[in-house]
Image: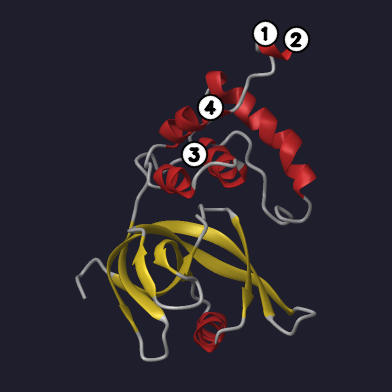
Amino acid sequence: MSAAGFELPLFPLSSVLFPCGPLRLRIFEPRYVDMVKRCMREGSCFGVVLLQGGGETGPIDGIAAIGTTARIVDFNLLPDGLLGLTCRGERRFRVLRCWRQEDGLNMGEAEWLEDAVPRVVPVPAEHRHLADVLRRVLPELGEVYTGIEPRFNDAAWVGGRLVEILPIALGDKQACLEMDDPLERLAAVSPLIRRPEDPSDA
């Protein structure tokens, strides 16, 4: 392993997880049950990466190079007997190499990605309508965002939540995740959301 690298279990999914974003999973495969037990025991995270080939329940043919760590914040036994997990996205990472353990669990050597501007960047005036949209929409999504502290003046937080809920292609969501600058992410999302003052609203 390189000096900068660290190991973590990988969970390839047909979805893109952002820092501070919600993730709910139904766990039934032994490899992931064991992974959950280890994460709970060690207080560690696992890495969520976009699946680019293969299936979520079998061998994978490819994954995105950049993902987000997920921390388990709650779990329960579902009516169908499966293990239900509530997780939160934490930090972005880049996969340097990956391999498959004998039990089928995908592992990766990764390095942390630092945001271009690590401090909180306020939402600029030209994108304030995006935060306003979130204020209206999030309460309508049920329990998905329960327990997630709203940060409507944080450009990274607003951009991440919008990309999560917008009906855009997974490749576009992944491209937004890979952007280091939160203002660049807002600029990419802004054309997809109509401003309330647009003449077409009349």
Percent position (x, y) of residue 96?
Answer: 26, 65
Percent position (x, y) of residue 15?
Answer: 52, 57
Q: Is residue 198 left or right of residue 180?
A: right
How far, Cα to Cα, is label 2 from label 4? 20 Å
Q: Name the residue under label 2.
A: 202
Q: Classify mark 3: helix, strand or loop.
A: loop
Of the image marks 4 and 3, the number of the one nearer the N terminus: 3
Of the image marks 1 and 3, the number of the one nearer the N terminus: 3
How far, Cα to Cα, is label 4 from label 3? 19 Å
Answer above or below: position of 142 versus 23.
above
Which of pointers 4 and 3 indicates the residue nearer the eye? 4
Crowd band around label 3 with a 10 angstrom C-alpha radius: few (<14), some (14–19), many (20+): few
Of the image marks 4 and 1, the number of the one nearer the N terminus: 4
Q: Name the residue under label 4.
A: 190
Residue at image coords 45%, 37%: 182
Q: In this view, does 85 lie to the left or right of 48?
A: right
Q: Which amino acid does label 4 sit on?
A: Ser
Which of pointers 2 and 3 indicates the residue nearer the eye? 2
Q: In this view, does 150 lie to the left or right of 66?
A: right
User: Which image quadrant is residue 67 in?
Assistant: bottom left
Quadrant of the image for the C terminus? top right
Q: Looking at the picture, tell me which residue is in the foreground, 131 or 102.
A: 102
Q: Name the residue under label 3.
A: 120
Pointer 1 with pointer 2, Cβ within 8 A: yes
Residue at image coords 76%, 78%: 78
Q: Classify mark 1: helix, strand or loop.
A: helix
Quadrant of the image for the N terminus? bottom left
